[in-house]
Image: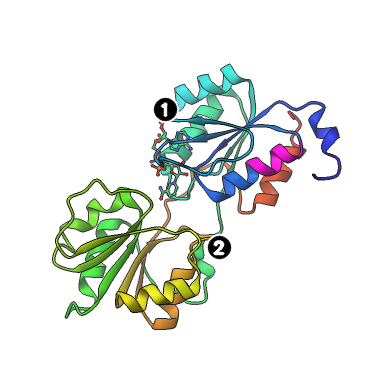
Amino acid sequence: MRAGCLAYSASVRTVLILGGTAEARELANRLSDVGVAVFTSLAGRTPAPRLPGGRVRVGGFGGPDGLAGWLRAEGVSLVVDATHPYAERMSAHAVLGCASAGVPLLRLDRPSWSDHPAAGSWRWVGDHAAAALEAAGLDPRHTGSVLLTIGRQNLPAYLATLADRTVLARVADDTGLDLPPRWRTLRLDPRSDLADELALFAAHDVTVLVTKDAGGRHTVAKLDAAAQRDVPVIVVRRPAPPPGVEIVTEIEQALDWCLRSDVI
Ligand code: NAP
């Protein structure tokens, strides 16, 4: 527990964390540890998510108005949007809902991978359709596998373009899709380290990696493995963050923002 936590807890109200990321979980745990009342909100896509400290609510709010109503009903004093960098709709709704309810909003956005030592050699594209075309143009003799680490929701954008390729789609849950015959799914193991990734690349002869700029340290090992094996990497750029919102990249900064805030 941090020094000074009793001073914070005396006037504590409630912080809502828009979650679904490891950072959101850690922030909720840290705030709970110092006596702040925390709600974490999850979209409900993952059947058995790892739960943070504090209270948890699951499911959409019903758009910005629904969020604003929920914030008022629960007497929420601060919102931290700690959703994944690609959860674009929720982040946009957070801006509108918080403005409407008059609740301060902070965006916790993990650092991009653009500073990775190999980032200069990656092929950066604007969307998944472009990534699929780029992947189709690499390894033209189709000797190896394309490893897709772009999330289950984005797989449909690759199905037609890579239908005749050997594809490994790494996903957290069932795809619910009818996949082409040479496609296989692999379960995402968030603990995979560099040795695991190198073994995977070798076992499946991965010759192309397609990914998003998820950022942070948890899933960066695949990029280190690609660099070591000289495998071309295609990265779908992040959506722009919503305008007009204060953004921090570190959990510690979000914690400070919550604890410094006048309304808590
Ligand atoms: P999205 O497209 O931005 O959001 C679609 C809708 O889902 C939102 O409008 C909202 O519904 C609901 N929603 C999303 N996140 C929510 C949350 N934390 N709490 C309550 N409702 C939420 O979101 P997404 O890309 O599908 O991501 C869904 C969740 O998975 C997020 O929590 C995100 O952090 C996590 N995640 C996403 C990715 C990714 O690559 N996109 C990767 C890892 C984890 P209403 O409009 O009804 O409020």
Q: In this picture, which residue range is highlighted in magenta?
A: 28-34
Residue at coordinates 55% horizontally, 28% vertically from top-left?
99
Q: Give left or right: position of 82 versus 176.
A: right
Which quadrant of the structure image shows residue 76? Answer: top right
Mark 1, other Cα within 10 Å: few <14 / some 14–19 / many ≥20: some
Mark carried by residue 63 = 1
Q: Which amino acid type is shown beneath numbered disc 2?
A: Arg
233 in magenta: no
Q: What residue did someone put label 2 on?
A: 217
Quadrant location of the C terminus? Answer: top right
| Ligand 1 located in image quadrant | top left
Residue 188 versus residue 143: which sits nearer the camera? Answer: 188
Which quadrant of the structure image shows residue 170? Answer: bottom left
Q: Which amino acid type is shown beneath numbered disc 1?
A: Gly
Secondary structure at numbered mark 1: helix
Determine if residue 261 is in view: yes
Residue at coordinates 52% horizontally, 44% vertically from top-left?
50
Determine if residue 246 is in view: no
Which quadrant of the structure image shows residue 28? Answer: top right
Labels 2 and 1: the sequence-earlier one: 1
